[in-house]
Amino acid sequence: MAIKQKTALNLQPINQYVQVSFKYDVHFTRGLFELDNLLLAQVIAGNEEITPKRVLVVVDEGVLNYQNALLKKIALYGQCYADVITLTGEPIIVPGGEAVKNDSRFIEQIHQRIDAVGLCRHSYVLAIGGGAVLDMAGYAAATAHRGIRLLRVPTTVLGQNDSGVGVKNGINAFGKKNFLGTFMPPYAVLNDFDFITSLDDRDWRSGIAEAVKVALIKDVDFFNFIMTYADRLANRDMEIMEKLIYRCSQLHLEHIAGSGDPFEMGSSRPLDFGHWAAHKLEHLTNYSLRHGEAVAIGIALDTTYSYLTGRLLQSEWQRILVTLKKLGFTLYVSALKEQLDNPDHPNCIFRGLTEFREHLGGKLTITLLEGIGQGIEVNEVDLSFYKDAISLLQDWEILR
């Protein structure tokens, strides 16, 4: 059937251009809720004349297992600085880890409280917890009134050096990591090093993987620092950990501000080196793997692929894997080999490549290594080399 073309209007399109800038500070402190620590009160007061500000507190219940006086400290802090802070009822307590991102009821719970207490866009959601809780609470804050100010208080290494300092919020849906989410920078990030002293060994170690990641793609000197002090990091040396968190945060923030694509409009995401496999592994293991543990495996896999495809020297490949092992990471799990000959199977690790492309849109773009501190973006991969990389990782792990 022939389609009759309508007469075109002789009107030029109106080219709209809106420039938006964001500014937020990442603070480092100890004893954030001690009464003689003015930082939180100063951040909430800001430069505005109207105070006090209404604050809704969301707390990771896992933190309370180790910081049992935290709720009392928050209440006393609010009383002490009542001229600046109005706490809106008892804190909302939510589960930590991926469980809080897998159940949308927690988003609804925060939205209901925001509505009930009458928070406005000049109020604050103060989220205290690990990266998953910050992701979820950030998504809730960003979608109420089209954005309530978010104060992040990361309590894990991973939260303090990576996820807590960025501009992304989200929850999991349809079996996919961060399927629902927003880009909304926090009002401020308050890193309190005292929180990480009570982490268990797995959570202490988990966040180090993100430091290894950013060092490998951006800063050879930082990788050498991690390699040199891997044993001390594994043995919970606070001085070294604080330096690692600071430098890792700095590198992430520099990339977000300087990459030219802070809200990921393109198909490239260098800071997700190793993450296409990590996100899939988390799902395949029912989230029994911590995010950082899955990232360490993803780094090992992409590093091994880089070596097998001639981009990385064998000596560099060995240095990277040995460093990850010294830090205490396991570099192979059986989920890597499930359904390898059927790339479209939901349980095949290679489905992670498809899901990664879909999440970013456009063509597949992943980061590999052509040297320590030198990331390179590729748009095609050879699955046969990835299969060899998985087998090589398995053998390497068995030998150690």
Image (spheres, grey):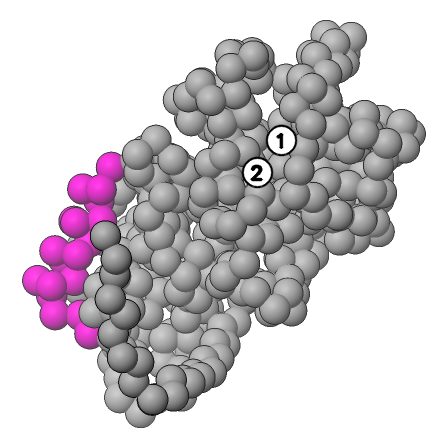
Name the foreground residue: 55 vs 272.
Answer: 272
| Residue type at numbered disc 1 | Gly
Quadrant into which the C terminus falls: top right
What span is colored magenta in the figure? 103-120
Q: Is residue 275 visible?
A: yes
Relative height, residue 65 to residue 2 (above, below): above
Name the foreground residue: 319 vs 177.
Answer: 177
* Secondary structure that dominates the magenta span: helix
For disc 2, the marked residue is: 275
For disc 1, the marked residue is: 298
Query: Mark 1 near mark 2, Cβ–Cβ under 8 Å?
Result: yes
Give percent across and percent down for residue 178: 39, 44
Q: Is residue 111 magenta?
A: yes
Give percent across and percent down for residue 258: 65, 69
Mark 1 and mark 2 lie on one chain; the one further toward the N terminus is 2
Relative height, residue 369 to residue 390 (above, below): below
Mark 1 Cα-neighbour bin, 10 Å: few <14, some 14–19, many ≥20 = many
Which residue is painted at 81% across and 29% down in the image? 309
Give percent across and percent down for residue 378: 69, 44
Helix, strand or loop at label 1? It is helix
